[in-house]
Image (tube, coloured by chain):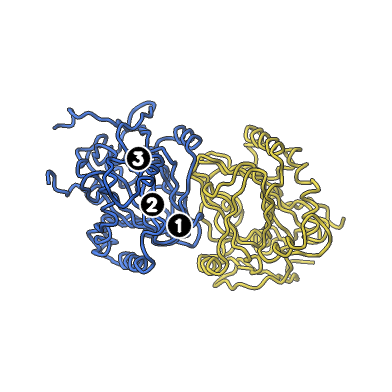
Chain colours: A blue, B yellow
Amino acid sequence: MTVAQRIDLYPTRVSGKAVTRPRVDPTVWGDGPGPLTGAELERYDADGFHVFDSLLPPQEVETYRAELRRLSQDPALLASDRVVLEPDSARLRSVFEVEKVSTVFADLLNSPRLMDVARQVLSSDVYVHQSRVNYKPGFGGAQFDWHSDFETWHAEDGMPRPRAFSVSIALSENYEFNGPLMVMPGTHKTFVPSVGETPDDFHKESLRVHRITVGSPGEEHLTRMADQHGIRQIAGPAGSAVMFDSNLLHGSNGNITPFARSNIFIVYNSVENLLEEPFAAPRPRPQHLGNREFPRGM
Amino acid sequence: MTVAQRIDLYPTRVSGKAVTRPRVDPTVWGDGPGPLTGAELERYDADGFHVFDSLLPPQEVETYRAELRRLSQDPALLASDRVVLEPDSARLRSVFEVEKVSTVFADLLNSPRLMDVARQVLSSDVYVHQSRVNYKPGFGGAQFDWHSDFETWHAEDGMPRPRAFSVSIALSENYEFNGPLMVMPGTHKTFVPSVGETPDDFHKESLRVHRITVGSPGEEHLTRMADQHGIRQIAGPAGSAVMFDSNLLHGSNGNITPFARSNIFIVYNSVENLLEEPFAAPRPRPQHLGNREFPRGM
């Protein structure tokens, strides 16, 4: 199938004015058994996110924190494309594709406690579309502006539908004041296109700078959606986690406190939703941002 | 008395390493009667701040919000030195010396409900050392890094002792996620000098930019004090207020939400603590930042 023949259910990076459209796809893709209860699935469907109060026991958190430190001191890794630094300092912001540099994290990504949830919600076999650890250091760790992940993955990675979700696992305490995840509950049911063409190699800029316009819903839409849906900030201890739909509007404020806010971030995608050519970008982003190695037709 | 003869109880803007010293002055300067109860005064003495759950009734909040809007649309005011803009945009950040541009705000500053608290805690007659309205707009309103106000007022304005406090009155809801005030309770009892000489006309920079080093306690001290004292973030509805000691470490994160966080900010100083020559700056800051018009020897 060539790009020209494709039907694009979620056109974005448009010129002129962005018009929102209702999501045509489900959020919960089946009703098979799995770790989440029926009530939890219903609420996830309505809100677009689910909180695990205690996903990892303290001892395991320590293991992953030690692994975070090890990665942050690996000179070869720090010199690689997998690493993103803070905009205002040389501090480490994120390391991508952690399953390739850490067997410890690879085991976590592939563990049944996560994979079973993914299979249940996406109602198919699943694979990891993207993974990263975020260090979000204290003393000026920068904000992430409001965005839908799916908007980017669709435009720049060629993900056809929002049949994917992210899990963010806290490896340090997420206080209400060190830049925890904020979401607008229920916004995953509306697709907000972004205005403007995608610049070439846009990801080199968009992952690092403070304020972006391409890939963002725009202030008018954000104001309306915040008024309508409200904002929920998700704090919690180390070991807690939140999963959220790929199209849920989310972001986080900066962090001037001394307390880092480290987490591991994993995106699960359905094998029935494999990446194609980008829907609105000159070429796909690199492998470490959007996994294209998953064998097709398995 | 000349500058050379003065004893400086709180030396700052030092060269080399900053050594903290215990505060030699009280926080509550007397035990006379006033609006605050004995228990409230004791807690203020220990923590360095006091929260008023409902200082202004809703109707009065509306009056002040209308006045905020009026000021933000006054071309003469916007072109004046009294105005500070956001670092990343042309949005209005603060208007200083509001009592000179607004009789509405002047009446509030001089109202007994505030003046009586100030007289009680500072145990003398009092006057307004500084006033401002902060607009802290949504969509990127910038952070205020951790600092002690007294460190600046002492170094740059010549305030001899920490016999002053600030009141911040919320004119819009302070959510936990739109950059509300954060404090480190109890840190008002320690003076943390800042390292480095004060540049000439430093205030033109320090009120606007993201990250400053002069006038800040430094990351090592901040980390230790946050570990020791913790951080308390003060959210509350419009009309609530918080008063805090001039030497309490405080700051606020940025605000990427669409919800502005506007407040009026008033500093009361004791008439027995009038400004002298700066303790560590080439010359005093302008009148709108540190009031020197209060008649001496009244």
Which quadrant holds the N terminus of chain A? top left
> Callout 3, which amino acid?
Asn
> Does residue A111 appear left or right of residue B184 in this picture?
left
In the rendered structure, the answer to whether residue B193 lies left or right of residue B54 reads left
Mark 2, other Cα within 10 Å: few <14 / some 14–19 / many ≥20: many
Q: Nearer the viewer, residue A57 or A7?
A: A57
Name the subunit of mark 1: A
Q: Considering only vertical position in the picture, is B76 above or below B116?
A: above
Task: Reply above or below: B57 against A234.
Answer: above
Q: Secondary structure at mark 2?
A: strand
Q: Earlier in the sequence, mark 3 or mark 1?
A: 1
Asked where in the image residue A63 lies, by quadrant, the reply is bottom left
Tag 3's secondary structure? Answer: loop
Question: Residue B230, how many percent across, how many down?
Answer: 55, 64
Residue annotated with mark 2: A242
Disc on the earlier residue, 1 or 2: 1
When the figure is inspected, residue A292 is found, relative to residue A101, above or below; the finding is above
Q: Nearer the viewer, residue B162 or B202?
A: B162
Q: Mark 2 belongs to which subunit?
A: A
At horizontal 74% and vertical 51% (from top left) the residue drawn is B291
Amino acid type for the residue under numbered disc 2: Val
Question: Label 3: which residue?
Answer: A247
- Towards the viewer: B212 or B136: B136
Q: Is residue B149 visible?
A: yes
Dot 1 corresponds to which residue?
A236
